[in-house]
Every structure is written in C-alpha cells, then in structure tokens.
Amino acid sequence: MRRIDLNCDLGEARRGTPRWAASLAPGAGPDPDDAALLDVVTSANVACGFHAGNRPTMNATAVAAAHRGVALGAHPSYRDGANFGRVAQDLTREEVARLVQFQLEELDMAARRHGTLVRYLKPHGALYNRIVHDAEQAAGVVDAVLRYAELAREEPLPLLGLPGSVVLDRASAAGVRAVAEAFADRGYRPDGTLVPRGEPGAVLTDPDEVAARVVAMATGEEIIAAGGARVVIDAASVCVHGDTPGALDLARRVRGDLEAAGVEVAPFVEPAGSG
C-alpha cells in the first residue's frame, strides 16, 4: 500500500490580529481552526515566533498535536513578522544557523514542558524557497539541525523540503534524514519548483483540482505544471497551507480522496507522546 504524510502550517497567529490577542488570554488553547485541522492532518509545522506565533501558540499547538497523535515539526523562518516570512534575506551561513537553531529550541522547550518533542524541521516561506538553490543558507539550516542534535544528545531531526533541493542534498550528505515534500494547494513550474506567490496559478483553492492533484502525486502520476507541462512530484509528505482559503475543507477532501484511492495517510516520523 502506498503511504503519505499530510502536513499543515499551524500556530501562525500574527501580531496585531484578533487571533494573536486571543492566544494571549488566560487559559487559551489552540486556535479553533488549528484544532480542527489537527483532527485531519498527520504532521503539524508550528510557527516559532519569527514570522508568526508566540510562546502561548507554541505551547497550545504542541499539546493539541500530542493529544491527537500528530507529529510536531518546527517551522522556522527569517525574522520577518511584517511580511509573514515571505521576503528573502541575504544572510550568512552562520546567521541562518543561529536563527534556525533559536527557533527550534523555542518550540522544543515548549513541547518538552508538556511531555512531547519536536520530531522534524521544515523551514517556512522565503527561507524554504531560498534553500532550494542557495547552498550557503541551506548549509546553515543543516548546521542548526546538527547543533541542536548535539545539544540535546539525540539523533538529528529529519528535514522536510522540496524534492531536488540543495538543502535536502546537504542534509543527506551530513547524515540528516531528508524528506521530500509536495504541496496540495500550490502551482508547480515545469522544473518542479513552486510558482511564486503573486503570480497566476500560484495558489490553488478548487477542492476537486487540489484533491485530484494530490492523489496523482501520491500514486506516482503526472500533474499539470505551469504552461501545460507534465511533471511527476515524488514526495513522502504533502502540505495543505493553513492560511489557504477553505484550508479545512481542502484538507478533509484531500485525506478522504487519498484514502479512497487506497493510500494510507500517516506521519513520516513517529509522533512523540503527550506524557
């Protein structure tokens, strides 16, 4: 039986929004939309404070994920709250390593306080796209994973990224498990990279189209890329963005269609327990 993970970006409260204010209320749990998505997905990429999120959202999302048996992943970004982490920055390898390690430590401390653990790392936004081709920043991300593994005296966390990306090559060469990821709700270029946000066809919202594309990707079939080209996206995990319009319905539809096609939907790494 074919198997694929279904992941989602969560805990992305932005400063100055009602969602941010709600997260700071005494006894606040996870965002209701996030909680609903956690009932559908199998892995959760949790914002670590640099593009969105704060310590309460990290705590609440870690607990909610653990209670549902969902694998918890760190979702670090450039320090870019104003642009939701979607503007690239020209940083050195060492600067990238420090900012990624800091965010990983923030989320993992939140998780450990509640008897669970971060189980993988997936960079966010502009950083994710930059390390598809930028060898120096990709090396910085891998450095952060290795440094944290040494600090925690544990095996390096798996790294989730775009198939064929420099960062996954760097990870594999360094002994870090490299996990290829596809996107349910994003358009692809003929070379397998994503259509940049802001361009036509970058974000897909039609449930029929999205679900059909995901089933095709999960079963090794071609999908239609920009310009009509056909590409095969080989991945162990597929992402539905939490901020895509209708994300919950999309996630439910994708999971339902995958299971109907005989594809097992399960995390690519074993979740940690809630204690």
Image (cartoon, grey):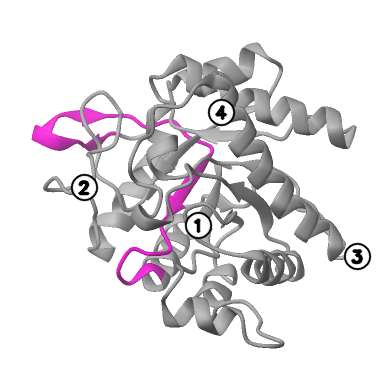
Which residue position holds label 2?
Answer: 202
Q: Which portion, as a residue range, is magenta?
A: 222-247
Front residue of 81 and 274: 81
Under mark 4, the amino acid is Glu
Does 245 appear in magenta? yes
Please report contact status of discs 4 and 3: CB closer than 8 Å, yes or no: no
Secondary structure of the residue carrying tag 1 is strand
Q: CA distance from mark 1 to mark 3?
A: 23 Å
Depth order, front residue of 184/167: 167
Q: What residue did someone put label 3 on?
A: 275
Is 107 located above or below residue 99 in the figure?
A: below
Q: Give amino acid for label 2.
A: Ala
- What count of labels does the image hold? 4
> To which residue does mark 1 refer?
8
Where the C terminus falls, by quadrant? bottom right
Of pointers 4 and 3, the one earlier in the residue sequence:
4
Tell me which amino acid carries mark 1: Cys
Residue 100: % across, % down = 61, 37
Asked if disc 2 and disc 1 are in contact, CB closer than 8 Å, the reply is no
* Location of residue 223 by image quarter: top left
Between 70 and 62, the one lying in front of the other is: 62
| Mark 4 residue element | helix
10 relative position to 147: left or right = left
Above or below, comparing residue 194 to residue 23 in the picture? above
Q: CA distance from mark 4 to mark 2?
A: 30 Å
The residue indicated by pointer 4 is: 95
Position of 160 relative to 267 (above/below): above
Callout 2 crowding tier (Cα within 10 Å): few <14, some 14–19, many ≥20: some
Going from the N terminus, do you reach mark 2 or mark 1 first? 1
- Look at 37% across and 66% down and name the residue there: 250
Residue 61: percent from left, percent from top: 65, 68
